[in-house]
Image (cartoon, rainbow, N blue to C red):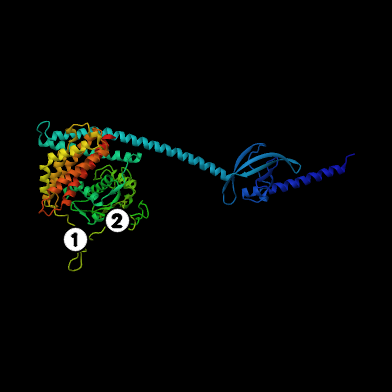
Amino acid sequence: MPDIHSDDSASVSHASSSIVLRAIIESLADGIVIVDDGGSVRFVNPAAARLFNRTPQDLVGTILGTPLVAGETTEMEIVQRGGGDIVYAELRVVTIRWEGKLAQLVSLRDVTDRKYAEERTRQLSHEREARLQAEAASRTKSDFLAIMSHELRTPLNAILGYSELIELGMSGDITSPVREQITRIRTSARHLLSLVNDILDLAKVEAGRLDVGSAPASVSEAITSALVLIQPQASAKNLQIVVKPGADRLPPYIGDAERARQILVNLLANAVKCTEPGGTITIEGELITSVPSGAHLVARRAHICFSVSDTGIGIPSEKLAAIFQPFVQADSGPKRTQEGSGLGLTIGQRLARAMGGDLAVESEVGKGSTFRLWLPADAPIGVHVADGPAPADVSDANGHPDDEATASAARPPDMRGLAAVADAVLADLPRLVATIVARIRSDSAMRAASGLRTSQVADHLSILLANIANALKVIEDAVGEPSPLLADAVEIQRLVSERHGAQRGRLGWTEACMRREFMIIREELEQVVRRAVPPDAPLAPADAVTAANRFVDQAEYISVRKLENERV
């Protein structure tokens, strides 16, 4: 006879165990769902209900909807009711007896944070790989451009050299039509060579191989040396260039003097191109102690601001940001009127930022443009303009500005006496060249010159110094007016300086040797100039030296640039 009391005891024990198990499950931090053999949810603890963003009563009786295999671990994606947020849960399944029947206990652990972290790690890995690939492609492109630019310069220089020899009559007499065609060939070759040099500079900047110096340099010298190159072009278009006074009283800027000059020359050249005949170009230097809006400058530091303004065609507002991108021009399309590669402003802005400054533009269509070049000033934030006479507030009898008097106050110094200086330089030319050659050979810092012949060391020096002397004569004769003879002198200087830099490059000179050579040239020429200033002339010796040094500085700039290009 069965023991009824023993069955009752087993039932009581089983019910007691279920109650204990339920209590344990409800207190767990992980979500627990009990699913019967038909896939229906029989029980949900509070943690699981929070994962689904529903109440346990809503979930009991529903189908879980995920295949369950005991002993395996998988993941499921849960779309929460209400907000539609997605959470990820890790599922672990075990078989148990629930309320006397076989069932499956599903453990749900929220792994949303881990899932997002893994996805972010994968995304960062993809981004890193893409960035490395892009950098490798950029380096390959820059190397290709540098190589091709160098290969293109060689035949272009040959074209220029032979066309100049033919024009000089080295191959026999030439007719006027042939001379005109040769001039066109030379002009086209120079234009193409300029584009190739721009591409090479851009390739160097992008590859991080374009070094810039960082030393104090004169603001007024930067402006003056840039004007030496641009004045002939401006005169040919009947443009007036106005230099606002005060630059000589500013503290120095910190940067690479040659690169700063390169940027200013490009800005002035663009202004000449975009300004109609009879217009005005204004250049100014000033000290600023606050960072203008939008400029990429170091806060709480003084900066020198070079401004180049024109009365030209202006730039549409929608193109202002794009003009600093490579190969972009404001005057674009098949009907554009200006030549150029669209690289000058790109290179200028990147050079400016490499020197700790920036380059920006403001413009209005039909009224002109103003480009501003900022470079760090060699002065603390509270500095004032160096002591010196302030520009006079000149007004007429009615209290209005007196334009004639203001122009007189800004007029350059009296240069009468430069012709006598030029004659003295020409008369002393053989001794001057011999002295320079002797100093170069004996200079311990210029070992590249020790084994050279005299003709190799003296190469181009006589022509260069004679051309500077002739240019000084033209300056006095022109009395501040545009002169085609001065344009010719600048052109001759450019040609001789390029040939000089190329020759030094072939001889294996470094940039340091080239700069040392021009330092010696500058020192010896200054002695001759100072001695040659007539005592009764209104010309001050310092002004005569400054005028001569403008041409020496420009010759150094062109020669060093050519040397760098030859050695790439």
Most extreme residue toward the right is 1
Q: Which residue is mark 2?
A: 287
- Picture residue at 27% right of the left edge, 42% below the top: 341
Residue 316, position in %: x, y? 30, 51
Image check: 204 left or right of 443?
Answer: right
447 or 146, which lies in front? 447
Three-letter residue code for mark 2: Leu
Residue 222, position in %: x, y? 24, 49
**Quadrant position of residue 286:** bottom left
Q: Which mark is residue 247?
A: none
Q: Residues within 10 Å of mark 2 (few under 14, many from 20)?
A: many
79 or 390, which lies in front? 390
The image shows residue 277, relative to residue 95, as above or below, that is below
The answer to whether residue 34 is seen in the rendering is yes
Which mark is first along the chain, 2 or 1?
2
Alpha-carbon span between mark 1 and mark 2: 21 Å
Q: Which mark is residue 406?
A: 1
Q: Secondary structure at mark 1?
A: helix
Q: Residues within 10 Å of mark 1 (few under 14, many from 20)?
A: some
Q: Quadrant of the C terminus?
A: top left
